[in-house]
Image (cartoon, rainbow, N blue to C red):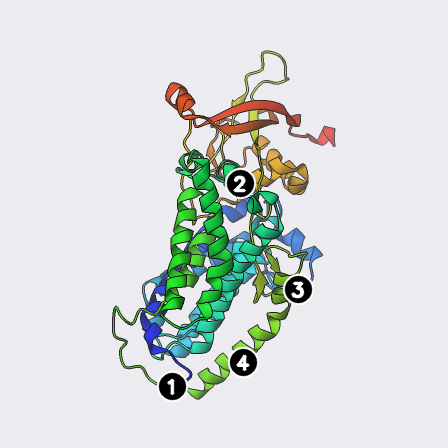
Amino acid sequence: MEWFTAPEYWLSRIVFQRALAGLYLVAFIGAALQFRALIGERGMLPVPRYLRLVPARRAPTLFQWHYSDRFFALCAWGGAAVALALVAGAGDAVPLPVAMLLWAVLWGLYLSIVNVGQTWYGFGWESLLLETGFLAIFLGNERVGPPVLVLWLLRWLLFRVEFGAGLIKLRGDPCWRDLTCLYYHHETQPMPGPLSWFFHHLPRPLHRVETAANHMVQILVPVLLFTPQPVASVAAGVIVVTQLWLVLSGNFSWLNWLTIVLALSAVDASFLVTAPALAGPPLWYVVLVCALTALILTLSYRPARNLVSRRQAMNRSFDPLHLVNTYGAFGTVGRIRDEIVIEGSADAAPGPDTVWREYEFKGKPGDVRRMPRQFAPYHLRLDWMMWFAALSPGYARDWFGPFVERLLDGDRDTLKLLRHNPFPDAPPVLIRARLYRYRYTTWRELRATGAWWHRTYLRDYLPTTRLRTPADR
């Protein structure tokens, strides 16, 4: 069955699979380290309460049959162990059916987590990891040549990621069309990185060139993925370079890294190494891959229609298994940056002499003298949602109150999500949240003060509050 396999992509498949397993590893570790405070039994949005409200058909997950924090931790750390094994090459050391089972286990475990993650897992890269991971189940191992149909499905996915992101920009904020969005984006993006300040201060003509280049890469280049080699490889290389530029300019979890991994699957690396002799695919494997292709093409109807729709939606799943989704980001770019600063006090009652101490988050801006850190591909879920909460209290309606209650209670799991706890000996008596306007400092201000940010108080976000007692209820 020479038509079925493409041995020249032997090396590309290895790189793709090992890198994808590495991103799975990061995702599972992040879930294991953060879930107790976010969705655990005593979390801000507990899984058991969610499962009582949502039927199994809307949220297929292992946790429909049983949930406990111990079982969740077992699933998360178990997924991390399987991912680590695949990074080390376990998928190529076992028979093809076992390798497919290992990839299926990863996908099933992470699907179970995403489908109970609620607000904390409502990001487009969760669906992207699941969709990519599902296709990886059928990509095979070194026992057989890479199946052509799956390679094309991976390109179709990469096309939707890039083309969808490009269209949402052209249809969205006018600053994308007049090439001025990058005047603001590096300053107002959800979680700046260590180089974001420098990117922001690049000359404005260069920002316009960046924006124009972004349109070319996201609108024109993805079409070339479906052309013969070596043009498709060149197109994939351009996408990789562009994504690395985005990696340097901000923290976007594993979105950029996963896009890079997808692009690498389209590279014909046969000029680097000769593929070894590979066995022909077994008939059952051919049947499964053909069935997969028919399924994905059928499910692609709604995402494809969304691409050409004037009301294009971003980051939407059309099925609870996240098999074929629609993607896109930053259809609108903010011109200002507001940040919520949470403060606590050990004083019994608020007054003019009350001493307030500030909580520091790991990734989101707080201390103006603290240079932003690089965290991607690791995802700081609370930090990201704090950015949304500053945009509108509606984004935080379900979880911000429980978050404050846990700070007042000194909850250890919640405090682990923060960089600095200003009350190491006893929880605060009072908590308040204030809204500040942040902007990057200028070169002169940075040299004079050592501050990366300048901030101005706007208003209270949450009035001074204390932990309720039974008598208060």
Q: Which residue is mark 1?
A: 2
Q: Determine crowd level at label 2: few under 14, some 14-19, many 20+ residues with C-alpha closer than 10 A.
A: some
Quarter of the view holding residue 228: bottom left
The mark that comes first in sequence, 3 or 2, is: 3
Q: Is residue 445 above or below residue 53?
A: above
Q: Which residue is mark 3?
A: 56
Mark closer to the observer (2, 1): 2
Task: Give the residue at x 59% y 30%.
Answer: 408
Quarter of the view holding residue 458: top right
Query: Looking at the image, do the residues carrying marks 3 and 1 touch, with CB atoms under 8 Å apart?
Result: no
* Residue 110 seen from this side: no
Report the front residue among 70 and 433. 433
Mark closer to the observer (2, 4): 2
Q: Amino acid at mark 1?
A: Glu
Q: Amino acid at mark 3?
A: Ala
Mark closer to the observer (3, 2): 2
Residue occupying the far top of the picture:
353
Residue 412 at what x, y percent from top left? Answer: 50, 37
Q: Which residue is mark 2?
A: 180
SS under mark 2: loop
Task: Give the residue at x 68% y 56%.
Answer: 311
The mark that comes first in sequence, 2 or 4, is: 2
Q: Determine crowd level at label 4: few under 14, some 14-19, many 20+ residues with C-alpha closer than 10 A.
A: few
Residue at mark 1 to residue at mark 4: CA–CA distance: 18 Å
